[in-house]
Amino acid sequence: MTDTRGSTGPNGETPARHAPGAPCWVSLMVHGPAATEEFYGALFGWEFRPGPQQLGPYVRALLDEREVAGIGRLPPDRHLPIAWTPYFASRNVDRTAETVRSCGGTIGVGPLDAADAGRLAICSDPSGAVFGIWQAAAHLGTTVSGVPGTPAWNELLTFETASVAKFYRTVFGYEEEPMVSADFDCVTLHLGGGPVAGIHGLGQALPRDRGAHWVTYFQVADVDDALDHLVHLGGHVLKPVHDTAHGRVARVADPEGARFALLQPAG
């Protein structure tokens, strides 16, 4: 399904609307947006364009004129963790928000309209991890993937997977594929036959200073080069480069402390 109100690509094509439950956007709220834009612009090659201002000053990051992510400014009196927040698509944010509440989650912001871009709510799951819901109008969300500088994956780090996976299954209709292992508590969430997100239960190893939280993976062409660049720009390495089934990964943080991961896909 497409939406003719969405922004067109460089060749005039209309981006597809994200299926309900699919990750459709990532957004970061910070205290110093100008410095943050400079950091991510240099790291990923993003350019920026003003976006809806309902939650304060906000810009959309673009790659080759295609929207990738959002960066906004936290109100000075809001002392919230600086973190990337994934948004999941919904055809009716108000109805999805009610399901979140009925399943033990909470609504922190909204539902509210973001000008003509769409309607949103910012929620927490029962373990306290923050995520967003997006009902697209003029703004469909991320319109490019599979190239360096774009979100490639979202993973929830939480205490245990069983109850949290049930929450997301009920809210968004996911199917679950658990990793059967005595050493790992991991579940992959599927939608329409394909994987869309992961949940990793860390037990007592869950960082107490952060609690449960989502981590966004951004694709890079060469993770070692990207890591060197990140450190030069003032970022921090949380977990050095390591090999996974999906490619080479490093966990990092930007200068304000927002955690994310760099992924060089396998193959």
Image (cartoon, rainbow, N blue to C red):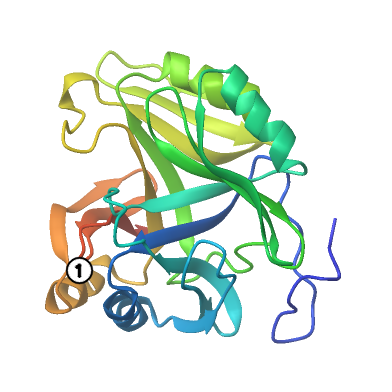
Identify the residue at horizontal 14%, vertical 59% (top origin). 237
Q: Is residue 49 above or below residue 68?
A: below
Q: Is residue 100 above or below residue 151?
A: above
Image coords of residue 188 (percent x, y): 49, 31
| Res 13 quadrant in image | bottom right
Instruction: Judge left or right: residue 91 versus residue 35.
Output: right
Image coords of residue 107 (percent x, y): 53, 35
| Res 29 quadrant in image | bottom left
Residue 2 in view of the camera: yes
| Res 111 quadrant in image | top right
Identify the residue at horizontal 73%, vertical 76% (top origin). 7
Identify the element where label 1 is drawn.
Answer: helix
Instruction: Judge left or right: residue 16 versus residue 162.
Output: right
Q: Quadrant of the N terminus?
A: bottom right
Instruction: Judge left or right: residue 93 versus residue 103.
Output: right
Identify the residue at horizontal 71%, vertical 37% (top origin). 94
Q: Looking at the picture, which amino acid does disc 1 mark?
A: Leu
Residue 266 in view of the camera: no
Instruction: Judge left or right: residue 37 versus residue 174.
Output: left
Looking at the image, the residue that sits furthest to the front is 77
- How many residues crowd around disc 1 within 10 Å: few (fewer than 14), some, or many (20 or more)? many
Q: Quadrant of the C terminus?
A: bottom left
Say which residue label 1 marks.
227
**Between 198 and 258, the one nearer to me in the picture:** 258
Identify the residue at horizontal 69%, vertical 86% (top origin). 10
